[in-house]
Amino acid sequence: NEVAMCGVVTIGDCIIDEIRAAGQPPRRYAGGAGLNLAAGIARLGLPSVLVTRLGQDRDGFWLLRYARDRGVRVVNTPGVDPTGVAISTREAGEPSYAFAPAMYRRRIAFPPPALAALAAAGAVVVNSHPLDNPAEVDLLVAALQAAPGLRIVDPNPRPRLVAAMPAYRQGFERALAVAQMAKLSDEDVQHLYGTDWTGIAPRLFGLGVGTILFSHGAGGATLLGRDGLRLHVPVADHPSPVIDTMGAGDATLASLVASVLREGWPALAADWQRHLAQAMRVAAATCRQPGAELVPAWTPGAEPVITPSRQGTDGETG
């Protein structure tokens, strides 16, 4: 498939996730919504490029190696800041976040290698971006307008990282004007609009986007189309207990994008239903391991495989 071979360019964060849980020493993982999605795309067998910003430091070099080992090509425009770190404290598997100072100055540029990757991509996914910075949004919109493939925006707002949520919402909506698809969690909708997902679909369709994926955590996912398409898929059954929900949304989106690129834009609701059900199986498998690294879907009747924890930046197993 020529489109699938063009692969996916992800625009977003590549950071260190430091996880703290009561009674345990901190564990450090490669993370960030952008890296999670890009690594997931590669794990599903498609060419994957990540446009991001990393510091010229130990963490940044480790993340570059991590991405390379997973088949992700990184286009980096380093600045003077160190690599970002997100600190998440877990309660019953759910994260709450705090951020190192560099995260508040995050910037993503589009040098010629990034623009060349965008021009060749079958899909471009924005997954966490400084959308409250108008200058950054200008650069993003211009880059998306030059990308001929499928364009998807996942705003992924983190309230503690956003100085002004109205500005972030405005930036998100500017990006939607040049996108075909949006993905939002229930938490995203609440942060951006102060309502539930059923109340904002008409507004988003009015901005130009044609398809919206809403993820509901334990409630599954819903896909809406401006043409009247409406599908809901519950979470997938899995024999193992949930360990970590952090990568579920990125795994869902990665699986859906991979399915669309491999088979083409679905013409029938049944095709969307099949793709979304597969995405729920991938998300369920991903939630059965620590961290946010995508795990391909478990097949009923097969023994589930739980991958070991990823290595931390000190080289020890987390």
Image (spheres, rainbow, N blue to C red):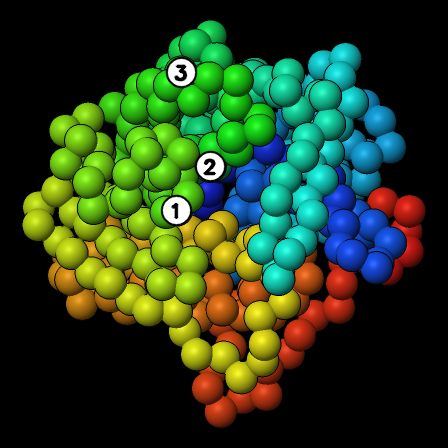
Q: Residues within 10 Å of mark 2 (few under 14, many from 20)?
A: many
Between circles 2 and 3, the one closer to the viewer is 3
Inspect this view and state whether residue 103 appears: yes
Residue at coordinates 37% horizontally, 19% vertically from top-left?
166
In the picture, residue 276 is in which quadrant? Answer: bottom left
Placement of the N terminus among the 4 image quadrants? bottom left
From the image, tell me which residue sits under label 1: 185
Residue at coordinates 54% horizontally, 88% vertically from top-left?
302
Q: Secondary structure at mark 2?
A: loop
Inspect the image, locate mark 1, and give the three-letter code of the amino acid beneath it.
Ser
Residue at coordinates 32% horizontally, 54% vertically from top-left?
260
Would you say 243 lies left or right of 18 here?
A: left
Inspect the image, locate mark 2, and give the three-letter code of the amino acid beneath it.
Asn
Instruction: Locate residue 18, reporting x and y percent.
Output: 75, 44
From the image, tell me which residue sits under label 2: 156
Inspect the image, locate mark 3, and give the three-letter code of the amino acid beneath it.
Ala
Instruction: Locate residue 45, reporting x and y percent.
Output: 52, 58
The span from disc 2 to disc 3 (Cα, nearest Å) is: 14 Å
Q: Secondary structure at mark 3?
A: helix
Residue at coordinates 40% horizontally, 34% vertically from top-left?
191
In the picture, residue 218 is in which quadrant? Answer: bottom left
- Of mark 2 and mark 1, the one earlier in the sequence is 2
The span from disc 3 to disc 1 (Cα, nearest Å) is: 19 Å
Q: Secondary structure at mark 1?
A: strand
Would you say 53 lies left or right of 298 here?
A: right
Instruction: Locate residue 242, reporting x and y percent.
Output: 58, 70
From the image, tell me which residue sits under label 3: 167
